[in-house]
Image (spheres, rainbow, N blue to C red):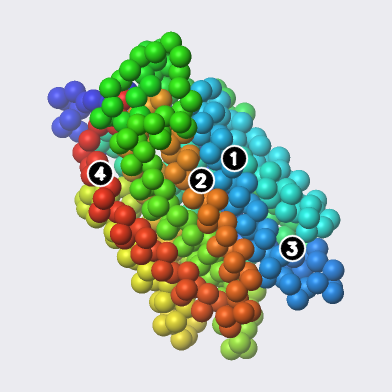
């Protein structure tokens, strides 16, 4: 259901048109995504210490491979759970699926803290990923369908910034708990239980999407605004709908290609930045763990700036040019970190800018995907595009972990992987321009 403004409302700034209900929905989705960001970056931050604690001494030479496997399995679970969760949200509603997702990843994150072997940790990571993936698409669809047209891109950018704030929170918590010793990594996962309590607030504070409720009542099964809103007593399976409609199929496939570029670039390249900075510091006689944690804070601070600016940049540039801006930035900022920075201050500055482009790039999903698909398949489409690419991208950390030794270090692997950003640059000009358009019914 599209949102319109009255003549009086149209003269007001976009923020003045928002009601307390709009802000409650943003807050709920934002904090869900904060803890997704926390959970994801906590794994990246502590995977080294966790593998050292869990691997037998005779197998610690395979630490990079074990770490890559744990991250890849989390990503694989995220892909599976996210795709399923988005489909379910189109059937049972945005609010209900959001609550299920938050409870699920809270439980399995907490259980990860009690892992006694690499196999147990990897299993809990997969189960955590199942629920992590479904939270984003659900919260994003809920916000997109309830916020006014003029404010929606800014709200989506604010929502997406939750991941950056969560990652920054993880880096900050690790900064303080790291000195606790070799078991400090367990504390990081125990903190991840906290979002479960968020559900107690969300149950009564937010309402279901009126657009979704209306689409269910009217049995509107169209995929895009170009398709006729056919009404039928028998609802098609939403995932099949995306590929049965020609325009929906084109948009889905092109968006998936851009998603592969975004996701593979981050998981295969940027997630190694704290470790790379820590290694650089250790090589120059400084504390590697300390500077790795500082790099994590700096990197995620850059991501937060990218998220907060995203809605304004997308409205100013238009959607297609904004996409080109993001992929070009990721392509340039990879060598800026891994090849061109020869001092610790330069490396930290490059990490800040890298965060703005490579992690901040995920904002395009929140801003753009809801504008491409109709209400009845919006959750499915957003989840499929956001998560299906992870079935490919999970190979990034897995292969990177294997190739680091073979190719002579992180820098060589990062540069080889960075060509993936070219994929987004090629695809972006073929996407529809949706700036200023109402949300499809």
Q: Which mark is residue 432?
A: 4
Mark nearer the N terminus (2 vs 4):
2
Q: Nearer the viewer, residue 49 or 199?
A: 49
**Mark 2 closeness class: few <14, some 14–19, many ≥20 residues within 10 Å:** many
Residue where numbered disc 2 is placed: 387
**Picture coordinates of residue 377 (x, y %)?**
42, 29
**Mark 3 closeness class: few <14, some 14–19, many ≥20 residues within 10 Å:** many
**Mark 4 closeness class: few <14, some 14–19, many ≥20 residues within 10 Å:** few
Q: Residue at x 58, y 69 (%)?
A: 400
Mark nearer the N terminus (3 vs 1):
3
Q: Residue at x 59, y 42 (%)?
A: 80
Q: Mark 4 and mark 2 in contact (Cβ < 8 Å)?
A: no
Q: Marks 3/1: CA distance?
A: 24 Å
Q: Marks 2/4: CA distance?
A: 21 Å
Q: Marks 1/4: CA distance?
A: 28 Å
- Is 406 displayed left or right of 379 in the figure? right
Q: Mark 3 and mark 2 in contact (Cβ < 8 Å)?
A: no
Measured along the vertical axis of the image, is residue 50 above or below residue 364?
below
Q: Mark 1 and mark 2 in contact (Cβ < 8 Å)?
A: yes
Task: Select label 4 or label 3 by which is in front.
Answer: 4
Mark nearer the N terminus (4 vs 3):
3
Circle 2 SS class: helix
**Picture coordinates of residue 124 (x, y %)?**
73, 48
Q: Which mark is residue 50?
A: 3
Residue where numbered disc 1 is placed: 81
Circle 1 SS class: helix
Measured along the vertical axis of the image, is residue 127 above or below residue 229?
below
Q: Which mark is residue 336?
A: none
The quarter holding residue 349 reads bottom left
- Is 95 displayed left or right of 363 in the figure? right
């Amino acid at each position: 259901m599209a949102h319109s403004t009255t003549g009086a409302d149209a003269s007001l700034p976009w923020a003045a048109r928002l009601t307390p209900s709009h802000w409650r929905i943003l807050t709920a989705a934002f904090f869900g995504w904060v803890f997704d960001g926390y959970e994801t970056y906590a794994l990246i931050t502590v995977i080294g210490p966790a593998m050292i604690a869990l691997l037998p001494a005779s197998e610690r030479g395979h630490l990079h491979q074990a770490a890559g496997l744990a991250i890849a399995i989390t990503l694989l679970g995220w892909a599976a759970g996210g795709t399923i969760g988005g489909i379910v949200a189109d059937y049972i509603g945005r609010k209900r699926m959001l609550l299920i997702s938050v409870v699920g990843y809270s439980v399995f994150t907490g259980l990860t803290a009690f892992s006694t072997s690499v196999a147990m940790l990897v299993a809990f990571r997969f189960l955590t990923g199942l629920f992590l993936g479904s939270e984003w698409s659900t919260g994003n669809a809920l916000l997109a369908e309830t916020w006014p047209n003029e404010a929606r891109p800014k709200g989506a950018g604010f929502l997406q910034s939750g991941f950056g704030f969560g990652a920054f929170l993880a880096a900050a918590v690790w900064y303080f708990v790291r000195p606790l010793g070799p078991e400090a990594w367990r504390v990081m996962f125990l903190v991840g239980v906290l979002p479960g309590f968020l559900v107690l607030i969300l149950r009564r504070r937010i309402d279901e999407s009126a657009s979704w409720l209306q689409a269910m009542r009217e049995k509107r099964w169209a995929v895009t605004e170009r398709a006729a809103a056919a009404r039928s007593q028998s609802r098609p399976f939403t995932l099949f709908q995306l590929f049965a409609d020609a325009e929906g199929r084109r948009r889905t496939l092109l968006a998936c290609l851009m998603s592969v570029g975004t996701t593979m670039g981050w998981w295969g390249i940027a997630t190694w930045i704290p470790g790379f900075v820590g290694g650089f510091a250790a090589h120059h006689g400084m504390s590697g763990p300390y500077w790795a944690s500082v790099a994590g804070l700096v990197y995620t601070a850059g991501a937060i700036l990218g998220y907060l600016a995203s809605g304004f940049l997308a409205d100013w540039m238009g959607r297609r040019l904004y996409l080109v801006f993001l992929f070009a930035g990721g392509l340039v900022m990879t060598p800026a970190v891994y090849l061109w920075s020869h001092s610790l201050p330069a490396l930290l500055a490059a990490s800040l800018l890298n965060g703005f482009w490579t992690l901040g790039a995920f904002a395009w999903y929140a801003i753009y995907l809801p504008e491409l698909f109709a209400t009845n398949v919006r959750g499915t489409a957003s989840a499929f595009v956001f998560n299906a690419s992870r079935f490919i991208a999970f190979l990034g950390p897995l292969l990177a972990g294997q190739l680091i030794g073979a190719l002579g270090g992180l820098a060589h692997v990062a540069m080889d992987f960075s060509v993936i950003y070219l994929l987004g640059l090629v695809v972006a000009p073929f996407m529809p321009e949706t700036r200023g358009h109402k949300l499809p019914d």
